[in-house]
Amino acid sequence: MPVDKKYVQDFEPQVFYHIYNRTNNVEPLFKNDANRLYFLKKYAMYLSGYVKTYAYCLMDNHFHLLVRIEEEATIINTIKNTPEEKRLAMHQKVLEQPEKDVDLPSIVNKQFNRWFTAYAMAFNKQQQRKGNLFHRPFKRLKVRDDVHLMQLVYYIHANPSLHKVHLDFMNYRWSSYQSLLSNKATLLQRKAVINWFGGRAAFIKYHQILHGLDNIKPFVIESD
């Protein structure tokens, strides 16, 4: 079934997006925790320098991300610092053309697809599986404003409750909720997220108060 065009928006620098993708035919995306860790490792490998990450949640057959696209200069610098043997033809083209001609949406889109492909190849090999693992194209929706940002963070974290996987979503291991409250090193933009809510206590309170499906249904993008 085709994806609604409103969910396949071009990437723009310094704009926030809700990113979502799922497996084909509701297949498992992960078989174990090692798969989940590998998924996140590959995400960092392919998307660092292209996006900043603010929230995430890994579910059984899909995932959610809240990201902000890096500014164009940062992305170009990331490509420049990529070892030559790891650059794609597209990357090499970027380095050979004027910055005004750089097709930023295609570059960022390609990095996401490289991430999906790298994970799918490893997962297929491990599980002796063949064929596409992910639904295409993946969904991305621009964030409207600051209120949308806060509600979206809650929605992403509350996903385990929405899908009745883990009713106490604040203790769900595979979302960014606990990481945002931790002092451990992270790629998450922890300080920015906590500041959106007015501090750590307010962040926790917001998640406690907004329990209930009525508060998160407007953000559901899972169904095609």
Image (cartoon, rainbow, N blue to C red):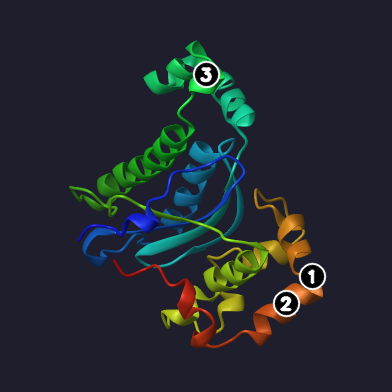
Distance CA(mark 3)–CA(mark 2): 42 Å
Name the mark on residue 200: 1
Q: Which residue is mark 3?
A: 83
- The image shows residue 222 at horizontal and vertical percentages of 37, 68
Point 55% across, 20% down: residue: 99
> Which-is-in-front pick, marks 1 and 3?
1
Distance CA(mark 1)–CA(mark 2): 6 Å
Left or right: residue 190 versus residue 148 is right
Secondary structure beneath dot 1 equals helix
Q: Which residue is mark 2?
A: 204
Mark 1 / mark 3, whichever is N-terminal: 3
Which is nearer the eye, 201 or 74? Answer: 74
Tell me the amino acid under the disc marked 2: Ile
Task: Please tell me whether residue 106 is drawn above or below residue 166 in the rendered image.
Answer: above
Tell me the amino acid under the disc marked 3: Pro
Task: Please tell me whether residue 52 is drawn above or below residue 224 in the rendered image.
Answer: above
Label 1–label 2 contact, CB within 8 A: yes
Tell me the amino acid under the disc marked 1: Arg
